[in-house]
Amino acid sequence: MAEQKYRIGTGYDIHCLVEGRELIIGGIKIEHEKGLLGHSDADVLIHAIIDAMLGALALDDIGTLFPDTDDRFKDANSVILLKKVYDLIQKEGYWVNNIDSNIIAEAPKMMPYIPQMKELLASVLGLESTDISIKAKTKEKLDAVGEYRAIEANAIVMLEKISE
């Protein structure tokens, strides 16, 4: 990989809403009658951020690093996966400069939880909460998200070469 001062990556994730699961987004438990279906905790925001981080360095994606065929990752806490990926990013000589992200859901309302999400992510990544943008969007009743059947997230991450 050519050494560059800045590298940018994008990430995306979507999971179906189902009964009998907790709803965890941005590492925060959100009160809701349904949760997201997935092999891990199905945290769409953290998964999108992980893929953006990996994409910035042209590394494997989240599904390759933490496959759903591996029982070690069954119901895994995505915050722990994020920490593992950030360790990998730092070993490559980079740190996260900033994150811009969206959570797309019709319900529940995400805005009340966003400050907690930002604080948690900032603490894991050694950032200020002002280095992390999380916006709440809807699909205006369109597609699976708009029909209250799924939640999705996307993220852009800028990595910066660690100064020596």
Image: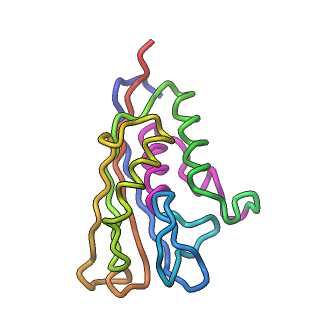
How many numbered discs sit on the rendered protein? 0
Q: Indicate the quadrant where residue 110 lies.
A: bottom left
- Asked whether residue 29 is drawn in magenta, I would say no
Instruction: Find residue 141 and report its horizontal and vertical position in percent.
Output: 27, 85
Of residue 19 and residue 66, the one placed in the foreground of this image is: 19
Residue drawn at x 32%, y 60% is 102
Instruction: Find residue 134 and report its horizontal and vertical position in percent.
Output: 32, 55
- The C terminus - image quarter: top left
**Residue reaching furthest left?**
140
Q: How is the image coloured?
A: rainbow
Magenta region, mostly helix, strand or loop?
A: helix
**Residue reaching furthest right?**
71
Residue drawn at x 49%, y 49% is 50
Using residue 8 as the reference point, say whether residue 87 is left or right of it: right
Q: Indicate the quadrant where residue 78 lies.
A: bottom right
Using residue 143 as the reference point, say whether residue 140 is left or right of it: left
Of residue 76 and residue 6, the one placed in the foreground of this image is: 76
Residue drawn at x 53%, y 38% is 86
Magenta-highlighted residues: 44-69
From what the image shows, is residue 61 above or below residue 135? above
Using residue 137 as the reference point, say whether residue 12 is left or right of it: right
Instruction: Find residue 27 and report its horizontal and vertical position in percent.
Output: 51, 57
- Asked whether residue 46 is drawn in magenta, I would say yes
Using residue 79 as the reference point, say whether residue 12 is left or right of it: left
